[in-house]
Amino acid sequence: MAVAVCHCYCSTALPKSSTFLSRFPSQLRKSPDGQGCGNSMHAFRTNALFWGPKKTARPKEMEISLGDFTLTGSGPEGMKPKKVSISVVPSISEVSSNDWDACTMDTTGPEKFNPFLTHGFLSSLEESGSAAKETGWMPQHIIAQDEHEKILGVVPLYLKSHSYGEFVFDHSWADAYYSYGSRYYPKLQCCVPFTPVTGERILIRNTAYKDQVFDVLVTALKDLTSKFQVSSLHITFPSESEWHKMKEKGFLQRIGMQYHWKNRNYKNFDDFLMDMKQSKRKNIRQERKKIAAQNLTMKRLRGHEIKASHWDSFYKFYRNTTDNKWGSAYLTRDFFHNMGSKMGDQVLLVVAEEEDELVAGALNLIGGDTIFGRLWGCHPRAYYPSLHFEACYYQAIEAAIELNLKKVEAGAQGEHKIQRGYLPVTTYSCHYILDEGFKKAIEDFLVRETAQVKLVMKLLHDSGPFKDGLFN
């Protein structure tokens, strides 16, 4: 595999570039040519690793076999041994939507249905070129089939050449690898691209063999990591139960934090506000009044109500956000059109109109008991005070109450969400590091980081926006 590493250098001393990297004694660090380097070395940031030019060797887009397994274990007496074959496919199109979605639904159940795990969402990412080899996301999905070619389990997996679009940050780990003359990229990433939403990652049919299929698929993930000779395997935003299981299988555990709103059987938005402290309640009402004062009309559109023109406008809004905030867009225009046509009523698009012209929008997906807020964008020519809060947070809360859903997940980051009723919750990730020396260093770092995250979450909860004693 021909590779090239892209680094960004600055004049900051190396120990200041990362709290993780600073744990390595400077006299032991190595430069890329293998020579030791002291404090005079400049700080760097490993941004990405790119596939080489077409004439060089690169991972082949072909199905890979990871071997056969025999399932016997627990179950009804007389349960016959079952042969299972594990393979890697280069595209989700190699699996029928019925088979993939059956694994998803059996794993989550209808109440916890997660739209991001569906064939429709994942295939939209691939078909639109958003999650593709050219963007550093090479699909390597793992499939488990029995002797009759019935699919018993699937795992969304990507061979990645960078750390963008993951929302679990490991750039400092890549820096540490590079400082020792080692290569961090490519790596394997088990996740939903560009989507910091918790959900199962090992998707299995509900059979008498399901626990064994789970174990086989995890073994296959670890075997593939070794087979590809990559640095590591990362499972980001798994369910809490998967997170605990992975610890037993040699994965390091990491936690993070998001902000979610919970529906406590509210009858309407005002009912929710009555649980807030008076000052917070007043602030939210003032913010909502600004929408009408600016001659803005809010609408919530679902399924067939969302036309191609809506997606074209929303893509412009999305690009305005990404160009101003991040400098590049992960998702293509085709993604929104494809996803909208495939996901139907699972899509909720909140739009703001000024004199019948669309000026802003917020994209949500609807799951079994949750509204998932994902993307936001606004017309570049104007600024509308409080519109972001209305479109992204308050409209989602109203929709959740109307649809009798249990919660709203508002995505990653943003402490401003707390004062609007969204409280901190724990997120999870699992990390399989092949190099034992780096594994130990990362494990030590995660112990310290976990303590810090837990402390911050407690402080944020204690200073929350709700009336004292409400949730005791």
Image (cartoon, rainbow, N blue to C red):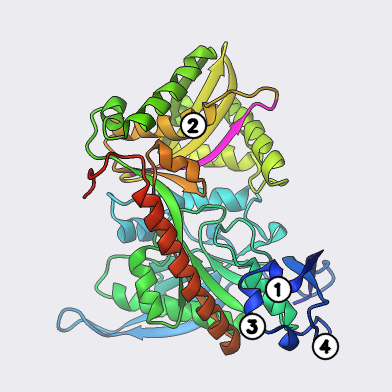
Indicate left or right for 313 with 397 as reference: right
Q: Earlier in the sequence, mark 1 or mark 2?
A: 1
Provide the residue designation for mark 3: 229
State the separation of the CA atoms marked 4 and 1: 17 Å
Does the stretch in magenta take in 373?
A: yes
Provide the residue designation for mark 4: 35
- Position of residue 386 relative to residue 326, above or below, is above
**Quadrant in the picture for residue 161:** bottom right
Do the numbered discs 1 and 2 sit on residues whose CB atoms are within 8 Å? no
Viewer-proximal residue among 370 and 105: 370
State the separation of the CA atoms marked 1 and 2: 38 Å
The kind of residue on which mark 4 rests is Gln
Number of the front mark, 1 or 2: 1
Residue 267 placed where, x, y %? Answer: 23, 29
Viewer-proximal residue among 334 and 386: 386
Check residue 389 in the rendering and tell me which mark sits there, or answer none.
2
Q: Secondary structure at mark 4?
A: loop
Q: Which residues are magenta?
A: 370-380
Indicate left or right for 136 with 120 as reference: right
State the separation of the CA atoms marked 2 and 3: 45 Å
